Image: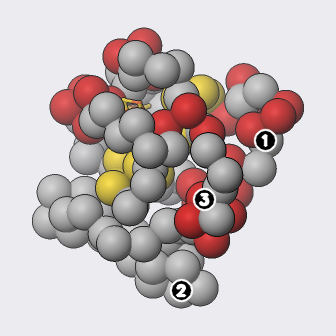
Amino acid sequence: TYTIAEPCIDVKDKACVEECPVDCIYEGDRMLYIHPEECIDCGACEPVCPVEAIFYEDDVPDEWAQFTPINAEFFADSVTGLGSPGGAATVGAVDKDHPTVAGWDA
Ligand code: F3S
Ligand code: F3S
């Protein structure tokens, strides 16, 4: 899967959303999150992010390693309970973030 890391926080450019063929990039309050099971690893989102926030999971810089689980946990019952909706357009923007992101001192 691909992962969105720290540079997206409070930026939310959303160029990535337009590129994703399976609509698996979901909007939280401070950043966007890629659904790890819905992502088909096409790579289309990565080059369009103006702040280079998107990485293939094996290429996430060590300083942002925690963002791989953060993207996955955004969908868990403990955070949003979204599960696997199969598309971000129907969900829309969610007024929540992973707790680590909510408290991030950007
Ligand atoms: Fe964030 Fe970059 Fe997408 S800033 S919303 S990951 S284009
Ligand atoms: Fe979507 Fe492809 Fe990125 S499936 S999240 S545009 S890698």
Mark 3 to mark 1 CA distance (whole Å): 13 Å
* Mark 2 or 3: the one toward you: 3
Answer yes or no: is residue 2 visible: no
Which numbered mark, 3 or 1, is in the foreground of this view? 3
The answer to whether residue 67 is seen in the rendering is yes
Judge whether 84 appears above or below 38 on screen: below
Question: Which residue extends farthest left?
Answer: 90
Whole-Å distance between the Cαs marked 2 and 1?
22 Å
Q: Residues within 10 Å of mark 3 (few under 14, many from 20)?
A: many
Disc on res. 77: 2
Percent position of residue 84, x then y: 39, 69
Query: How far is the residue under mark 2 from the one under mark 3?
Result: 16 Å
Badge 3 is on which residue? 101
Between 12 and 39, the residue placed more toward the observer is 12
Q: Amino acid at mark 1?
A: Ala
On the rendering, which quadrant does ligand 1 occupy? top left
In primary-sequence order, the first of circles 2 and 3 is 2
Placement of 76 over or under 44, stated as above or below:
below
User: Upstream in the sequence, badge 3 or badge 1?
Assistant: 1
What residue sits 39% from the left and 61% below the top? 28
Q: Which residue is found at the position 85% from the left and 32% from the top?
A: 62
Q: Secondary structure at mark 3?
A: helix
Three-letter residue code for mark 2: Asp
Where is residue 98 shown, x and y percent of the image?
57, 67
Q: Secondary structure at mark 2?
A: loop
> Residue extending furthest front?
105
